[in-house]
Image (cartoon, grey):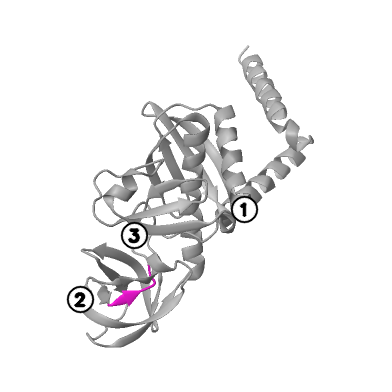
Amino acid sequence: MTEKLFEINSMLTECDATVVSCTPKDDKFLVVLDRTVIFPEGGGQLSDQGKLDDAKVSYAADKGGDVIHYADKAFAPGQKVHVTLDWPIRMDRMQQHTGEHILSYAFWKSCGANNIGFHMNEDMVTIDLDKEVNQEEVNKAENLANLEIWQNKQISATYMNDSEVAKLTMRKKNENVHGAIRIVAIDNGDICTCCGTHFPQTGAIGLIKVLRFEKHKGGTRVEFNCGARALKNMQERNIVLVDTSNMLSVKEVDVPEAVTRLKTELVELAAQSKE
């Protein structure tokens, strides 16, 4: 079984390890180490990337407690390697995942909506809520979530047994997990079971921004970005807004009204051309 150093300290970026096995598959080599800082995909969080010496690791998976590193070079069992984490990718994953905990808590706390689904890819992060919410409720949850960040609260990850977990007031419990259960807790905030990586403090997330929400299977699907993704998204949207306001010769706040007016004029012109 691989020693998962990221469960002990999510800020570790490198370690030395010994190769346990190496199996070729397609154009990759599936390398199992005795220890690693590279997180395998799981719990909704995308896999880390990194290197084993100079070999690139593009993906990692957990199989029976072993972390399998998909490397572009073969290694011999017993060989010593230096494991290096691609930190910018890890930071992005942690910002999205830790932010998801906080936003889900904010919806649960502010309007009683439970997160029943979580998905993350390279561009988008969504949560599915078990009830419909409106713009006012979304704003309230978003404000509360960002307040949790700005207070820079401590985040801890500990293992507890079933009886200890039963005493906790948790937003989300996994009834199918037994034995040693990993609990991720934010001071005076979210508490839930989770296998992912998280920052030591909430401040490292920086920002949570809800991008859109829509009705979904009797509830609501909420799309959002956190941290650097949120900043980049807002920068791109602001460029579009400013360019549009300049083309319409109106202030940014007046763009929707100007577009509506232009659309009405086009409809009227189209009607006149048919007369």
The residue that mark 2 highlights is 23
Q: Position of residue 257 (x, y in %)?
A: 71, 26
Q: Which of 83 and 260 is in front in this view?
A: 83
Q: Where is residue 113 in the image (x, y as percent from the top left)?
A: 44, 32
The residue that mark 1 highlights is 231
Residue 228 image-quadrant placement = bottom right
The residue that mark 3 highlights is 41
Residue 223 visible somewhere in the drawing: no
Q: Nearer the viewer, mark 1 or mark 3?
A: 3
The span from disc 2 to disc 1 (Cα, nearest Å) is: 41 Å
Residue 250 image-quadrant placement = top right
Relative horizontal placement of residue 264, taking residue 50 as reference (left or right): right
The residue under the point 37% across, 69% down is 58
Give the main secondary structure, helix, strand or loop, of the magenta stretch. loop
The residue under the point 61% across, 39% down is 143
Query: Given the image, on which type of amino acid does mark 2 rest?
Result: Thr
The answer to whether the residue labelled 2 contacts the one labelled 3, judged by CB atoms less than 8 Å apart, is: no
Q: Residues within 10 Å of mark 2 (few under 14, many from 20)?
A: some
Q: Does the magenta stretch include residue 36?
A: yes
Residue at the extreme top of the image, as rendered: 275
Q: Give the range drawn in magenta.
A: 34-38
Q: Is residue 112 magenta?
A: no
Q: Nearer the viewer, residue 55 or 163?
A: 163
Which mark, by number, is residue 251? none
Query: Given the image, on which type of amino acid does mark 3 rest?
Result: Glu
Sequence-wise, which precedes: disc 2 or disc 3? 2
Q: Is mark 1 on a helix, strand or loop?
A: helix
Query: Given the image, on which type of amino acid does mark 1 rest?
Result: Leu
Residue 226 visible somewhere in the drawing: yes
Q: What element carries label 2?
A: strand
